[in-house]
Image: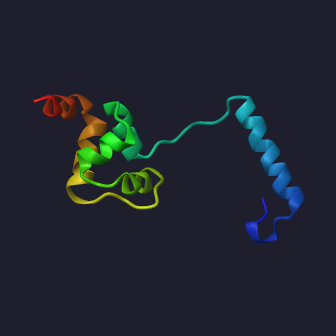
Amino acid sequence: MKSNHSMNGEDLGQMILKGLKQVKEGQFSVVYSPVTAARTKLGMTQEEFAKLLSVSVRTLQGWEQGLKQPAGAARSLIRVAVARPDVVREVLAA
């Protein structure tokens, strides 16, 4: 494959067509960030999870998109939520 710097329109078109064909044939996977995985396992909206972590929704979205990484207590809670969402739910219910 050519580098992005020397790619012409035809090469780009072929890459797009190949990608579309793979999607149509089910040859793809969705990769979630650990933050998205934690939120999903807890069944929370972005607004709810951001409130739980005491961060803005915009910050949470940045973490989910991989633009920035959580630190400190937020990172620890996210790890627990991924590994043991039942424990987080139990603590939240208390």
Q: Is residue 21 left or right of residue 62?
A: right
Residue under the image location 82 percent in, 65 percent down = 7
Residue furthest to the left in view is 94
Residue under the image location 31 percent in, 47 percent down = 50
Task: Determine the image quadrant of residue 1.
Answer: bottom right
Percent across and percent down for residue 22 are 73, 36
Residue under the image location 27 percent in, 53 percent down = 75
Which is more toward the observer, 6 or 33? 33
Q: Is residue 62 left or right of residue 75?
A: right
Percent across and percent down for residue 93 are 15, 28
Render colour scheme: rainbow
Q: How many marks?
A: 0
Residue under the image location 43 percent in, 46 percent down = 33
Q: Is residue 65 left or right of residue 15?
A: left
Percent across and percent down for residue 76 are 22, 50
Task: Determine the image quadrant of residue 62.
Answer: bottom left
Q: Is residue 65 left or right of residue 55?
A: right
Quadrant where the image shows the C terminus = top left
Depicted 59 relative to depicted 22: above or below: below
Which is more toward the observer, 39 or 24? 39
Residue furthest to the bottom in view is 5
Depicted 28 relative to depicted 59: above or below: above
Percent across and percent down for residue 78 are 28, 45
Which is more toward the observer, 47 or 72? 47
